[in-house]
Amino acid sequence: MAWFLNFYRCDRCRKVWTNEWSCTCDDECPHCGFRDMTPFNSEDLTELIVEEGGRFVVLRSSEEAEDDPSYEELGCFTTRDTAKEFLRSHQTN
């Protein structure tokens, strides 16, 4: 399932916040409660490459993810470039 880090700015109080969701959906301002704020930007976190112990681990959000991304490890590589190439060759539609 897709996973996004959404960036919001409240039309009422002008405060900025982020929230992770499985879509780029509207949110309620956690500062003043104003509703239906649309994200002004979103970062796709469905697939990630994280460095762990000098190796690069490729993660993808689980198809069963609901309240959190439930990342599944797809592979572990010695270089970031190798991990990126792996992701390019295993894209999902």
Image (cartoon, helix red, strand yellow):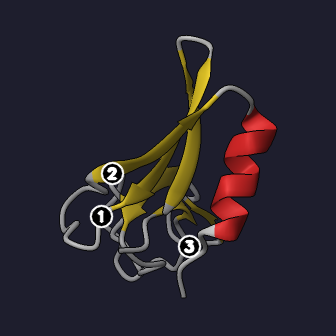
> Disc 1 or 2, which lies upstream in sequence?
1
Query: Residue most toward the right?
Result: 81
The one of 22 and 8 positioned closer to us in this rendering = 22
Nearer mark to the viewer, of 3 and 2? 2
What SS does tag 3 mark?
loop
Q: Residue 41 placed where, x, y %?
A: 66, 68
> Disc 1 or 3, which lies upstream in sequence?
3
Q: Amino acid at mark 1?
A: Ser
What SS does tag 1 mark?
loop
- The residue to which callout 2 is attached is 72
Q: Are marks 3 and 2 in contact (CB under 8 Å)?
A: no
- The residue to which callout 1 is attached is 62
Q: Amino acid at mark 3?
A: Pro
Q: Residue at x 75, y 42 (%)?
A: 82
Horizontal side of 85 relative to 22 (left or right) equals: right
The one of 67 and 84 positioned closer to us in this rendering = 84
Q: Are marks 1 and 2 in contact (CB under 8 Å)?
A: yes
Mark 1–mark 2 distance (CA, rounded to whole Å): 6 Å
Mark 3–mark 2 distance (CA, rounded to whole Å): 27 Å
The one of 73 and 30 positioned closer to us in this rendering = 73
Q: Residue at x 48, y 52 (%)?
A: 18
Q: Residue at x 74, y 29 (%)?
A: 79
Residue 78 against residue 67 in the figure, above or below: above
Q: Residue 8 placed where, x, y %?
A: 54, 63
What SS does tag 2 mark?
strand
- The residue to which callout 3 is attached is 39
Q: Residue 43 placed where, x, y %?
A: 62, 61
